[in-house]
Image (cartoon, rainbow, N blue to C red):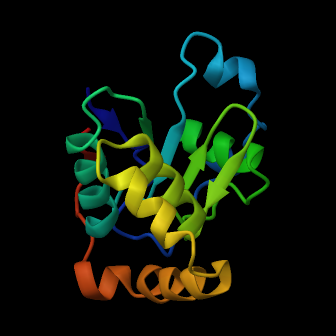
Amino acid sequence: MALFFPTQVSARLGAAPPAQVRKCVKATNAEFFNGDKRPIMLFDGVCNLCNGGVRFVRDNDRNRRIRYEPLQSESGRKLLQRSGRSPDDISSVVLVEKDRSYIKSEAVLKIMEYLDLPFPQLALLLNIIPLFIRDFAYDNVANNRYVIFGRTETNSCEI
């Protein structure tokens, strides 16, 4: 299955999206969770680290318990708004469940709970680390992800 980004998402990520793309209606549970109750992992679709993370999750989720959506897609933008975040915020991975959303290190640990062994146990162990320390480390990597890992020049990701 391939997801394609709107043509407005380009290598010029710094540019503001056109007005018609900026308008985003808040998503409802019915829109995303009626026929499929699996949580949705929102990720930065042009970030090489994030795309690698999606591949890792996909490879370690044999039962396909997680769905994926780029933050830059219209659905991703709606889900960000539903999660109480700006629809233009591509700074963090987000895991959206029917009744709750997780961001930053909480999202990563929650995603690990859905994966095959040993990742749920590793998530339990990492939960011992206080949230402010986990998020500090997460933010340092997230803020430098393009410099360290680069970004894709295409407008699509492989999922």
Percent coordinates x, y for residue 107 in the rendering: 55, 58
33 w.r.t. 86: above or below: above
Residue 41 or residue 120, whichever sits in front: 120
135 w.r.t. 48: above or below: below
Farthest residue toward the top?
35
Q: In the visual, does 106 lie left or right of 140? A: right
Percent coordinates x, y for residue 20 in the rendering: 66, 44
Q: Is the C terminus in the top left, top right, bottom left or bottom right quadrant?
A: top left
Q: Is residue 158 visible?
A: no
Q: How many marks?
A: 0
42 w.r.t. 32: above or below: below
Residue 158 or residue 114, whichever sits in front: 114
Q: Is residue 133 visible?
A: yes
Q: Is the N terminus in the top left, top right, bottom left or bottom right quadrant?
A: top left
Residue ID at (34%, 35%): 3
25 w.r.t. 17: above or below: above
Residue ID at (24%, 59%): 52
Residue ID at (63%, 21%): 33
Percent coordinates x, y for residue 24 in the rendering: 72, 42
Q: Quadrant of residue 85?
A: bottom right
Percent coordinates x, y for residue 101 in the rendering: 68, 48
Residue ID at (34%, 38%): 4
